[in-house]
Image (cartoon, coloured by chain):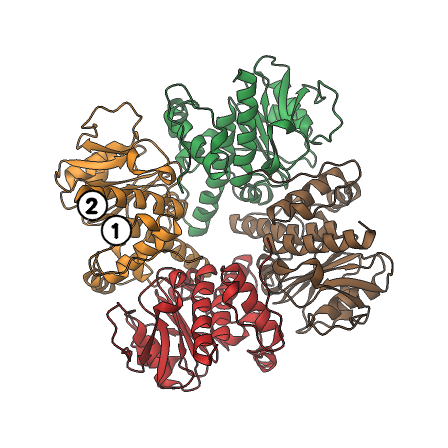
Chain colours: A brown, B red, C orange, D green
Amino acid sequence: MGNLDTLMQDLVIANRILAREEVVDAYGHVSVRHPDNPNRFLIARSLAPELVGPEDIVELDLDGQPVRDEDRSLYLERFIHAAIFAARPDVMAVVHAHAEDTLPFGIAQGTKLRPVIHSGSFIGTEVNLLVTDMAQASDLAKCLGANGVALMRGHGFAPAARSLIEVARLSVYLPRNARALMRARQLGGEIKYLSQGEIEARNRGYSPYSVETWRTWEYWANKAGCGHLLTRPEGGQARMPKG
Amino acid sequence: MGNLDTLMQDLVIANRILAREEVVDAYGHVSVRHPDNPNRFLIARSLAPELVGPEDIVELDLDGQPVRDEDRSLYLERFIHAAIFAARPDVMAVVHAHAEDTLPFGIAQGTKLRPVIHSGSFIGTEVNLLVTDMAQASDLAKCLGANGVALMRGHGFAPAARSLIEVARLSVYLPRNARALMRARQLGGEIKYLSQGEIEARNRGYSPYSVETWRTWEYWANKAGCGHLLTRPEGGQARMPKG
Amino acid sequence: MGNLDTLMQDLVIANRILAREEVVDAYGHVSVRHPDNPNRFLIARSLAPELVGPEDIVELDLDGQPVRDEDRSLYLERFIHAAIFAARPDVMAVVHAHAEDTLPFGIAQGTKLRPVIHSGSFIGTEVNLLVTDMAQASDLAKCLGANGVALMRGHGFAPAARSLIEVARLSVYLPRNARALMRARQLGGEIKYLSQGEIEARNRGYSPYSVETWRTWEYWANKAGCGHLLTRPEGGQARMPKG
Amino acid sequence: MGNLDTLMQDLVIANRILAREEVVDAYGHVSVRHPDNPNRFLIARSLAPELVGPEDIVELDLDGQPVRDEDRSLYLERFIHAAIFAARPDVMAVVHAHAEDTLPFGIAQGTKLRPVIHSGSFIGTEVNLLVTDMAQASDLAKCLGANGVALMRGHGFAPAARSLIEVARLSVYLPRNARALMRARQLGGEIKYLSQGEIEARNRGYSPYSVETWRTWEYWANKAGCGHLLTRPEGGQARMPKG
């Protein structure tokens, strides 16, 4: 299978994983930059991520316009993806989602969403919060700045990352970090956030293509019922689920 | 399929969706006004919504009486539906349910159920709370006033809307807004509710028949295992779930 | 089918319902008094309720001893059931379970488990709490007193009722009432408990054999995958689940 | 089946149970000491526990090195297991996991993780908390000391026990005890922890090979879809799930 075909298949997997892990429902979407043309990106037509198949993937330019004739409806929020890909050449994959457990941090003024668990270290010191009603896509792209994720008040969040696997990982672990912090707040007493040193040490050690990262992707894909779509990495062992 | 047949099928879908999304269990029901006779409405016989099929739909008048001979049991609370349809000619669909996460707002006196997430803007400034023990159905209809939803202390809630799709949406997003607000309260600090301006802007932009609304209905129907009952809208693309 | 056979089948259904509704797991059990001999009761052999079939039901006397030769293991806590049946001739069915959401009320001293939702009115004014480490079964039976449910600190709860359907209902709604009260406490402000008048009015209106009660039993049995075991009540409409 | 074969099958069951009970996801692992050679232990190759089969089990020495040629990837954290088996000859089985509901107790300084429910009595007086960033495996082994479980801040927990069944039980009940304590804290008022006397009485009465322990293992294995892998204990009754 060619590079593009594999990536489209991976994009289907990412859609299903995000649905299964309850990061997206009917709303929310994931996109990936075109492997051969950095001025284009791939995203599903307007469809709930759980239902997305390869035939639903469309190719858009950095203005959010389809590069081929298209009579199917497209996501209204595709412009958020386009703006991030345009503003951030280092970004290869973007999610925009409404995962419930991140919402309280955009509503309550008393607690910032900061990393408290090791797998939340990608958040950086704290999540940027967009407080304007309707964040303009370009503001969002700017807000992502050094960090990999932005929070939109009353609305959701948008992580950007260097690969599909990594953006899926951020999307699953941000709500998990949010839950751990919410519950810690309920327990009372001082909160021990990850220190700047811990965050940096952890992020230095992280590789988006490690054995551990692949294990997660393989697990989530199987859970989401699309283990059969996995492309076996060089030298790795792809596995089908057991009954 | 005729207009009435389609609507009955949609009512079956709405029953299954509300069950799958845990808005109703053995209790709770959804009804829709008759498309050809505004003095009648359709609702299931006394049966848990998850089990409802087309043959379980009965036609009632605005006194809650069946318009045809009926020897099967009917919901005791059908009079709530009848009273709302009688008092509010603009209402096309009604739900009455006990979704768990809305209940605390009828029990605790310290926090009103107000919109904090964009998809909760239909709540209006705040939810009306019926504090009488056994709310009379006509009081409930009055209480719905300008807003689309009323809360009954220790009992549940009743949203009314312009379509089945919309009433399902309200029923799913009211508990979600409730959860976001509960968790924000736990985080502490001031709560940022949606402003009157945000509520109005959001509600102005909402269309009960938009591409986005259909995407949600299609997604929920598939999740509830009745994607095959969907009626494809003009020009749309109905989709079956993937394995 | 004879009276005893029907009751044994209903006991199987009750086991599966309590498992599906997460009231019991490997621990927890449900029993019913023998229909023809008030000095005996039926309960499963030592087996997780989700796995119980008709062949696993054993008949015990009010000392908790099997009335027939039995080489299979029995629940250690069957003596709790025996003691309640011995002390309370009005009781026809007993559950002993560890449902997670009731536990905090036996641990925190600040909030009593009292009814806040209509379907929790069976609790009475408040749940009795056994604070001794290892509650003696006879103490438990006494503690049940006028109320239908006792709470055991750090351990679980035991409801007793006039029928299997009713004891299942109590077992599902006690945790639900507990959750609503916990969340109301988090919201802050004064708690509006059901008043004595409301509790009495509600309990007066309740019938363990009403159309509504059957609807719940039918729904739960279908959800638990044993709708096919349901015995259709006279004049009722038993229903199988839809795909 | 030989002793080793049975144990390997039990290790597969333990992997699946921990996945099904949400103690592990893509991360987290379970190991067991070799039945014939106390200087070796069995653990899966680098694979999500839900996907583990008998062919994925590898044999390692107490330095964490495979005793046979192995070209498949291994868990990075296998050294934690090795160090515990080396330091604690009484330990037969080890889990290392990240179960979400234990994490807040490593983050909030205000509440220690102590037993509040009977099935949490294995915790001892309180869980030891490793506050160093990257706990050295040997520190962890030491920290386990008299207790059976250690908590690692922002990371997870590690229980050690005398058998696979017991380590699975600890791994499921630690998060349950954590949830009960978190919710009790929300209810307010003084917390009634298990007393030293209650803890000792409970632990004295516990047998890792009792009828009750087997019932739990059987139940969890069936829930995890691998009831068919169960080895029937002498004189026991293994059971398959019912439809």
Mark number displayed over residue C1: 2
Q: Are marks 2 and 1 in contact (CB under 8 Å)?
A: yes
SS class, disc 1? loop
Is B91 above or below relative to A158? below
Residue flagged by tag 1: what amino acid is it?
A: Thr
In x, y percent, where is residue A227? 65, 45
Q: Which residue is mark 1?
A: C231
Subunit that carries the residue with mark 2: C
In x, y percent, where is residue C83? 20, 35
Whether residue A165 is visible? yes
Badge 2 and badge 1 both on one subunit: yes
SS class, disc 2? loop
Left or right? Give the position of B140 relative to C67: right
**At x 86% / y 64%, what residue is drawn?**
A39
Relative depth, front residue between D21 and D125: D21
The label nearer to you, 2 versus 1, is 2
- Quadrant in the picture for residue D218: top left
Whether residue B149 is visible? no
In x, y percent, where is residue B114? 50, 71
Mark number displayed over residue C118: none
Residue flagged by tag 2: what amino acid is it?
A: Met
**At x 44% / y 86%, what residue is drawn?**
B90
